[in-house]
Amino acid sequence: MTDRVLVLNCGSSSVKYRLYAGDEILAKGTVERIGEPGGGPADHEAAVREILAGLDLTGLTAVGHRVVHGGRRFTEPVLVDDAVLAAIRELFPLAPLHNPANLAGIEVTRALLPDVPQVAVFDTAFHHTLPEAAATYAIDRDTARRYDIRRYGFHGTSHAYVSRRTAELLGRAYDDTNTVTLHLGNGASACAVAGGRSVATSMGMSPLEGLVMGTRSGDLDPTIIFHLRREGGLSVDEIDDLLNHRSGLLGLTGANDMREVLARRADGDPAATLAFDVYCRRITGYVGAYYALLGRVDAVTFTAGVGEHAAEVRAAALAGLDRLGITVDPARNTTGTGDRRISPDGSEVAVFVVGTDEEREIAREARAVARATASAVTGAGSVPRPTPPG
């Protein structure tokens, strides 16, 4: 069997993989505890070797790698070469927790499968269509340029897949569909998609901005950082840790799992009730804002762990938006599985639940680059290249 694509998602201590033949999943899994004592593989090389040894790679046409941050340089998936590797390394300061692990996985796989095209697919790339007014922060422009400060956005492969799937469920052309997608997991982000183009998204220069998340604060007054430094004596690293790892649902309740928060709320826990309200109120505000930006919204779509499974969150997040034509049918919202509509028939704005599939989106994009590469070799096409630095 040919046209197989392997997708690798390398984290700091894990590697997730999925092997496709067309749309069929042949194998999938996760290797965990990389580099941890008494546990898993010693490093990413050992982990990837373990994965490849257990797979039938006959007919493998490409390996697609998730890379979190592409900065300004990468606005589409690209064939990996030495220059691309160097550029990903240069972007480490923008994603110090993610890009190093992503790069390690690419380097290992490239060495082990030197004849197979390696394709980097960037979380930020889908958002390269953001208007400058959406991507620009109102700070000194020379400082912003010097330090690459702008809105990049994340969860791009998820928002791309989910918005495209939403158009299919509506029976509309993708380029004629306006959607607000809500990726609600331990990390969470909202995106306004107009005709297949990201025009607004809640995450910013990093994944910290925007919605309330499992351990991240989301939006907050920057003065809080100064206050903690000056009055609390916290170091920059301590503030970073606080906002990224000890805030969000965890900071408000002591639990970062929405299922536990919902259980405590049902038992009358006031901290869990407040956390739920803060979480949902933030989503409501973004949906309303994105409705105003888009002008016409065909659908609001929930995805990822919380978005797909927490009916209470979906109902509360969209409560009070009836005047915008956004309503949730209580029965549909609390029943059913798989991709489905949870708004009443005939409602002005459809509301969907769609299971995200970032790996499938990465496979699709990697396959397209591999085909373009093959065409280029025969003189029939061109290979996507990274946007020059600047």
Image (cartoon, rainbow, N blue to C red):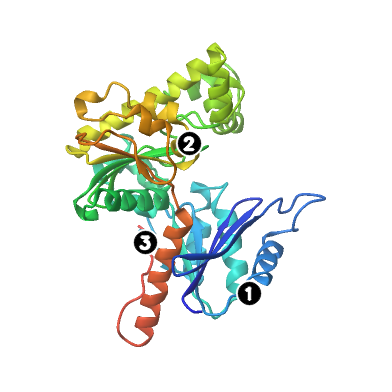
Q: Earlier in the sequence, mark 2 or mark 1?
A: 1
**Label 3, on which residue?**
76
Q: Earlier in the sequence, mark 1 or mark 3?
A: 3
Q: Is residue 272 left or right of residue 350?
A: right
Q: Secondary structure at mark 1?
A: helix
Horizontal and vertical percent position of residue 35: 73, 53
Q: Residues within 10 Å of mark 1 (few under 14, many from 20)?
A: some
Q: Residues within 10 Å of mark 3 (few under 14, many from 20)?
A: many
Q: Residues within 10 Å of mark 2 (few under 14, many from 20)?
A: many
Depth order, front residue of 163/245: 163
The image quadrant where one finds the C terminus is bottom left
Task: Find residue 272 and report its image quarter.
Answer: top right
Please name the amino acid that badge 1 sits on. Leu
Horizontal and vertical percent position of residue 49: 68, 68
Q: Residue furthest bottom?
A: 378
Closer to us: mark 2 or mark 1? Answer: 2
Residue at (57% x, 22% y) in the render: 263
Instruction: Give the Cα separation between the discs numbered 3 and 2.
Output: 31 Å
Q: Residue furthest right?
A: 38
Depth order, front residue of 62/260: 260
Query: Does residue 53 lie above or below 240 as drawn?
Result: below
Whether residue 128 is visible to the viewer of this picture, yes or no, is: no
Depth order, front residue of 208/337: 337
Please name the amino acid that badge 2 sits on. His
**Label 2, on which residue?**
309
Q: Secondary structure at mark 2?
A: helix
Instruction: Give the Cα separation between the discs numbered 2 and 1.
Output: 39 Å
Horizontal and vertical percent position of residue 274: 48, 16
Q: Which mark is residue 112?
A: 1
Instruction: Give the Cα separation between the discs numbered 1 and 3.
Output: 25 Å
Please name the amino acid that badge 3 sits on. Glu
